[in-house]
Image: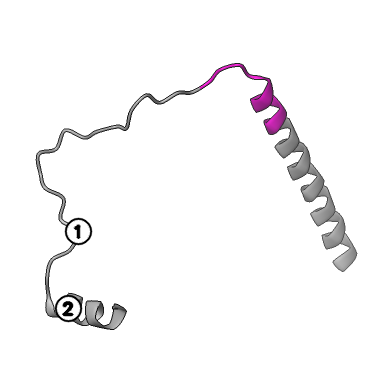
Amino acid sequence: MSKERRNFLKATAKAGAITAVAGIAITACSNTKVEQKEVAKGKSRKQEVLYQKSKYWDSYYKVAY
């Protein structure tokens, strides 16, 4: 049983390695470049709320700092 499993794992490892090499080769051969000129900005007018003050936040903050 372990011999069959080992052969299976060897075969899948080889297939994975071949796929990875092929993917890298295709990526390296392509001449297209992706450029992003500026950071994407949302259109929402809402203010971002990172946390709401609560007794749990206060106790966490006291322990953390």
Q: Which residue is mark 1?
A: 50
Picture quadrant where residue 54 is located: bottom left
Q: Is residue 7 left or right of residue 34?
A: right
**Placement of the N terminus among the 4 image quadrants:** bottom right
Q: Which residues are magenta?
A: 23-33
State the SS at label 1.
Answer: loop
Residue drawn at (72%, 28%), measured in percent from left and top?
Answer: 25
Residue 25, relative to residue 48: is it above or below?
above
Foreground: 37 or 13? 37
Q: Secondary structure at mark 2?
A: helix
Q: Is residue 32 one of those drawn in magenta?
A: yes
Identify the image quadrant of the C terminus: bottom left
Which corner quadrant of the image does residue 55 belong to? bottom left
Observer-nearest of 15 and 51: 51
* Residue 26 inside the magenta-drawn segment: yes
- Amino acid carrying label 1: it is Leu
Name the residue at the top extreme: 31
Taking 46 as reference, is 3 left or right?
A: right
Residue at image x 30%, y 78%?
Answer: 64
- Residue drawn at x 56%, y 17% is 32
Which residue bears the numbered disc 2?
58
Above or below residue 3? Residue 39 is above
Residue 30 visible within the image: yes
The residue under the point 67% across, 25% down is 28
| Above or below 56: residue 14 | above
Q: Residues within 10 Å of mark 2 (few under 14, many from 20)?
A: few
Task: Say what amino acid the circle numbered 2 marks.
Answer: Asp
Q: Position of residue 6 (x, y in %)?
A: 85, 60
Count the numbered circles shown: 2
Alpha carbon separation for disc pair 1 and 2 = 14 Å
Residue 19 horizontal/vertical position (percent): 72, 37
